[in-house]
Image (cartoon, grey):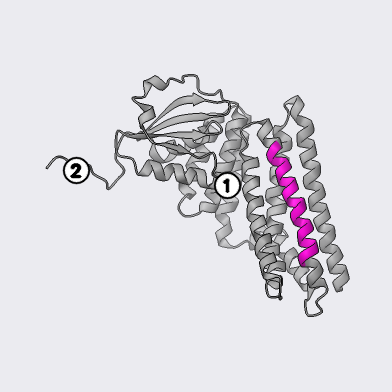
Amino acid sequence: MNTDQAVEAILAHHRTLVSRVESRVATLVDSVPTEGHAAPLASLVAYLAEEVLPHALAEEQTLYREAATRPGLGMTVAGLSTEHQQLAAAIDLLATAPDRREAVKWAHTVAQLFASHVTRENELVLSSLAGDSTVDLPAILRAMQTLTEPRPEQSAPAADVTAALLALLLKGTTALASAGKGEAACTLAASAWATLRAPRPDLAHQVTRELHHLVKLASQPGPQDVKPDRVQNPAMEPQLDVRTLVPAQRHDSIFETYRDLDAGTGFVLVNDHDPKPLRYQFEAEHRGEFTWEYLEAGPRVWKVRIGRTVLPSGRTVSGPE
């Protein structure tokens, strides 16, 4: 394979990725009037997670690394890497969209971000490297393909065993929820999240996304008992509004706020969707140690008062001297 053939192979792959993302977005949009958007949304998110994001990571490790050493391309590569982060954040928001309208909005955003990013990449990086006789583009292409091709299970590194087991467990939770065992599925997923949170935060984040999906799949009713007056002076307690944070940051911020509470105190969580997946995670880590009171239940704003009933291990309250 020569340089021209390598360039065309990369361009063709880019066209395929963009086309398949756009076709899945179109299918999602067409399904919305019939309220059958769950399957198209899952298909789009799966394709982005399994094809687009691994491709982006492989580019950073090969194409971008080479381009960054070339005069005049350093800032361009930095900007494209930032776009990868923006794309990943938008995919997170798509995966956890609270309703059909939000799902369509973020699907369009992801498609537009990705299409414009690929165009910039082709025009600013690929064309520059193709014109540099010292760059071995066929070798770069082979390295990218090696990074993105599926690896045989028997040769997978030991660190991936946990990921493989988690994938099997999440398939099981999906089957449970589909069989009408939504509560069991969500509880099991939350337990996995609690187990992985410290040693494998990357996999724990994956479980958080799946937990949102399980809650929707289980089709459990929303809160039936929203009574702000049951909580003493909720307006006097601090509020934590996570609506401006990306999903990856929301749960960490919430748990950090909870850890800082004294017994008998609480805070009001403000969110743009029912934080029911979060409650399963609290049950997994803090069963019997927290309270959960809905103060407002949508459709656009959700408020939950989260309180602490006991002190965290190692903390004490000083009495009067």
Q: Looking at this view, is 260 or 288 the one in front?
A: 260
Q: Quadrant of the C terminus?
A: top left
Magenta includes 109?
yes
Number of residues whose C-alpha sits closer than 10 Å to that of mark 2, classed few (under 14), some (14–19) or many (20 or more): few
x, y percentage for residue 289? 35, 35
At a point 68% along the width and 75% down the height, the residue shown is 69
Q: Looking at this view, is 185 or 212 the one in front?
A: 212
Magenta includes 115?
yes
Is tag 1's residue or tag 2's residue first in the polypeptide sequence?
1
Quadrant location of residue 150? bottom right
Q: Looking at this view, is 71 or 34 the one in front?
A: 71
At a point 76% along the width and 59% down the height, the residue shown is 120
Mark yes or no: residue 44 visible: no
Residue type, label 2: Ser
**Circle 1 is placed at which residue position?**
206
Q: Looking at this view, is 148 or 81 the one in front?
A: 81
The residue lying furthest to the left in this view is: 321
x, y percentage for residue 33? 76, 26
At a point 45% along the width and 26% down the height, the residue shown is 294
Q: Left of 225 or right of it: where is 27? A: right
* Secondary structure found at label 1: helix
Number of residues whose C-alpha sits closer than 10 Å to that of mark 1, classed few (under 14), some (14–19) or many (20 or more): some
**Circle 2 is placed at which residue position?**
318
The region drawn magenta spans 105-125
Q: Is residue 63 above or below residue 114?
A: below
x, y percentage for residue 50? 69, 51
Q: Quadrant of the N terminus?
A: bottom right
Q: How many angstroms separate mark 1 from mark 2 (CA)?
A: 40 Å
